Image: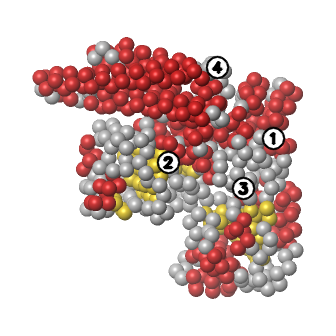
Amino acid sequence: MAHVAGLLASAVVSAVGNKLGSAIGDEVMMLCSFKDDLKDMKDTLEYMEAALKDAERRSVTEELVRLWLNRLKHAAYDISYMLDEFQANSEPASRKMIGKLDCFAIALKITMAYKMKKMRGQLRKIKDDHESFKFTHDNSSLISVHQFPDRRETTSDVIESLIIGRDKDRMNVLSLLATSSNKEDTTILPICGLGGIGKTTLAQLVFNDGQFKDYNHRVWVYVSQVFDLKKIGNSIISQVEKGSQNLDTRQLINQHLKHLLQDKKTLIVLDDLWETDNFQLDQLKLMLNVSSKMRVLVTTRSIDIARKICTVEAYMLDPLDNDMCWRIIKQNSGFESRADKEKVEPVGQMIARKCGGLPLAAQALGFLLSGMDLTDWEAMCNTDIWDEPFSDSTVLPSLKLSYNTLTPYLRLCFAYCGIFRKGHSISKDDLIQQWIALGFIEPSNNFSAIQLGEKYVRQFLGMSFLQHTQLPEIFAKTILTMHDLVHDLARSVIAEELVVFDAEIGSDARRKEYCHYVSLTNCNISDYIKARKMSTIFPPKLRAIHFTDCEFHGGAFSFPKCLRVLDLSGCPITEFPSALGQLKQLEVLIAPRLQDR
């Protein structure tokens, strides 16, 4: 993942350069005579920033370049933290007695001067090493620019006219369902393939096909990674029998399903099945074995799951051909309205060949190419990032390319989304506030930070880097989620800065020197000893912590002093940690489950 993580360097350097520019005009900095030091660091960063496009391109294949990029990125982070610390410590102490303030100010100035001298020396060394790589300076730019229910929930709705390349697959699946030889048992046909290849879309096309119009019942169930037999059974019952109440036991559920569906022509789609346990899958098959007139379509990424659940051999969904990917790119890029179609088309066809046959990749690239001129299309086509082959466990080259063409601040915002769990429902408003607190919104004289955050979200939605999720109307918030492959991309970009620890699966919680973000799940830190022990894994420069499904004792937990975002939405809390009062830089605190005592 290092070759992907290196792509965050230019974003960090650019943002810190802007931060230095703002600090140069700061009144306190000027009074402390730091203007020349700040300008020297800013000039050095800008000089190296001009070569970062070539450095990132070469980092895909050159280990030494990757290491150099990491050193530069870490130095930029250190400058940012130094500025934040100085600002936090130089604020409202002015209300203290004048004599004490003078002593405090002198000590602060001495400390800051020492840190700046150290940072300037570190930057000079990095700059000297930069010269040895002989980077080219390329000025061209491709573009300018709480937990909730029903995670990633899908529905049976689809706009068929917008779907490209799956007519043959639909007819094949319809044929398999129609010719099944099961005379006594339910027919179960899995659709299997790579994430993002279009399994759900194919299931939607089949579900809405006229072949099933005369069926007594059609049912769509989104299964998800959280496998719950009762939930699946009750969902089927509620769609067949309107107004029915949830049944409490599986015995009642199975009996009621047989009562409702025996001798009824029924189509059921179970979308996004992840469960691997043989017993659970056998119980699911048993629950669905109601009638030979029932047809069940299952979508899953895993061929092993497909083989366990099927009664008919799984249908393996192949990637689209290059022509189909090109049609999707044209559909999403506004190709037909271009005046230079004849020149752009051969370049676009070359780009389409690099989509790996994945509709999601073609859709994201199509949006990205919208509004670009021929030169930018050619630049997209020639980038080295495409070269790595993809698999189900790696990040798609096409999505890496889409990330690579984001502006620096958009890169930071997108990468930060990797702190959330896969499939997590993300509050748009909370996300924007966290971006703002972490300095990920580009300063503007014309738009507020919130307005720019909304703009960033819209761009991510258009690229399929974020997606809307389905929620009941009682939730007034806009809720977002990420496609699994896109989430993989965000995680790989932010890998060196993120610690993810889930106590139930024993994930790695080793301390990382340059960790800036932590996601904790299923941690019981309600007693003092465990809470203090967990606190020790956090490095001193941590910026954001997310707690999910954790038992939390407020008085025992301590936090790094430079923390800016604390998300406790996944924890029931009876009291706030006493250490919160010491967090001078904390800007976002999310605690919707705070309990009255």
Q: CA distance from mark 2 to mark 4?
A: 34 Å
Query: Label 3 sits on what residue type?
Result: Leu
Query: Label 1 sits on what residue type?
Result: Arg
| Among the two numbered marks 2 and 4 on one chain, the one whose residue lies closer to the N terminus | 4
Left or right side of 172 for 545? left
| Among the two numbered marks 1 and 4 on one chain, the one whose residue lies closer to the N terminus | 4
Q: CA distance from mark 1 to mark 3?
A: 17 Å
Q: CA distance from mark 1 to mark 4?
A: 28 Å
On the image, numbered disc 2 is attached to which residue? 419
Query: In this orientation, does residue 574 appear?
Result: no
Q: Secondary structure at mark 3?
A: loop
Q: Secondary structure at mark 2?
A: helix
The local crowd at label 2, few if under 14, some if 14 to 19, many if 20 or more residues have their Cα within 10 Å, is many
On the image, numbered disc 1 is attached to which residue? 353
Left or right side of 505 for 333? right
The local crowd at label 3, few if under 14, some if 14 to 19, many if 20 or more residues have their Cα within 10 Å, is many
CB under 8 Å between discs 2 and 4: no
Residue displayed at 69% across by 36% down:
385
Q: Secondary structure at mark 4?
A: loop
The numbered disc on residue 194 is 3
